[in-house]
């Protein structure tokens, strides 16, 4: 499923909240993988937020903000390599933002979403929530190991 750039802008800016505000958000220990539902506050739209930390590189993690199961609106990778379709290369932290005709194939500097390389995982998570307009989210628990 593809959406237009205008639809992306509307969806990313729509006010959202976690479906379950009582269950803490766990950012560890590794390995950990979860998906949580986000609900739009003014429409009936449903979004998903995914978090993944593997067991080989404990400091590496990924956050996805999805629409209708398959449309990735934002993907944050705090490590790795990526080459955009236009040849621009990223090494280290980068963010993928939906782009009409390319889905999430383009990466951008993390500064596009207000994140800095010195930010902790919890700060990155809260800045992504702010960028994605998630107004209400549960308590965050961070465990590095």
Image: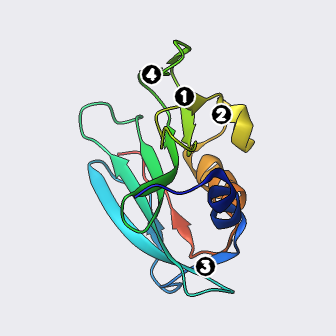
Image x and y of residue 22, in percent: 50, 86
CB within 8 Å, label 2 to label 3: no
Q: CA distance from mark 2 to mark 3?
A: 23 Å
Q: Which sits earlier in the primary sequence, circle 2 or circle 3? A: 3
Residue that badge 1 annotates: 93
Considering only order in the chain, which callout, 4 or 2, is on the residue closer to the N terminus?
4
Residue carrying label 2: 110
Q: On residue 17, which mark appears?
A: 3
User: Which quarter of the image is occupied by the C terminus?
Assistant: top left
Residue 129 at x, y = what percent? Answer: 64, 61
Query: Element under label 2?
Result: helix
Whether 15 is drawn above or below 128: the answer is: below
> Residue 66 location, x and y as percent?
46, 60
Query: Which residue corresponds to the image point at 31% horizontal and 31% vertical from the top-left?
Result: 57
Location of residue 106 with respect to 120 vertically, above or below = above
In the figure, residue 42 lies in which quadrant?
bottom right
Secondary structure beneath dot 3 equals strand
Q: Earlier in the sequence, mark 4 or mark 3?
A: 3
Q: Could you give the CA–CA distance between mark 4 and mark 3, rounded to whole angstroms?
A: 30 Å
Do the numbered discs 3 and 1 sit on residues whose CB atoms are within 8 Å? no
Q: Which residue is mark 4?
A: 82
| Earlier residue among tags 1 and 2 | 1
From mark 4 to mark 1, how far is it between C-alphas? 10 Å
State if disc 2 and disc 1 touch (CB < 8 Å).
Answer: yes
Q: Are marks 4 and 3 in contact (CB under 8 Å)?
A: no
Tell me if residue 71 comes above or below residue 78 in the rendering: below
Numbered disc in front, either 4 or 1: 4
Q: Secondary structure at mark 1?
A: loop
Q: Nearer the viewer, mark 2 or mark 4?
A: 4
Instruction: Please determine whether, in this image, residue 50 is positioned above or below residue 135.
Output: above
């Amino acid at each position: 499923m593809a959406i237009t750039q205008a639809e992306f802008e509307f969806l990313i800016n729509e006010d959202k909240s976690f479906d379950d505000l009582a269950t803490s958000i766990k950012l560890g220990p590794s390995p950990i993988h979860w998906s949580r539902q986000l609900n739009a506050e003014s429409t009936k739209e449903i979004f998903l937020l995914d978090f993944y930390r593997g067991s080989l590189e404990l400091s590496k993690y990924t956050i996805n903000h999805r629409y209708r199961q398959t449309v990735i609106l934002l993907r944050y990778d705090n490590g790795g390599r990526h080459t955009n379709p236009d040849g621009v290369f990223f090494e280290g932290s980068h963010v993928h933002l939906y782009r009409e005709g390319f889905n999430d194939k383009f990466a951008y500097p993390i500064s596009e979403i207000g994140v800095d390389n010195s930010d902790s995982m919890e700060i990155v998570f809260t800045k992504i929530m702010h960028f994605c307009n998630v107004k209400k989210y549960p308590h965050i628990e961070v465990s590095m190991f």
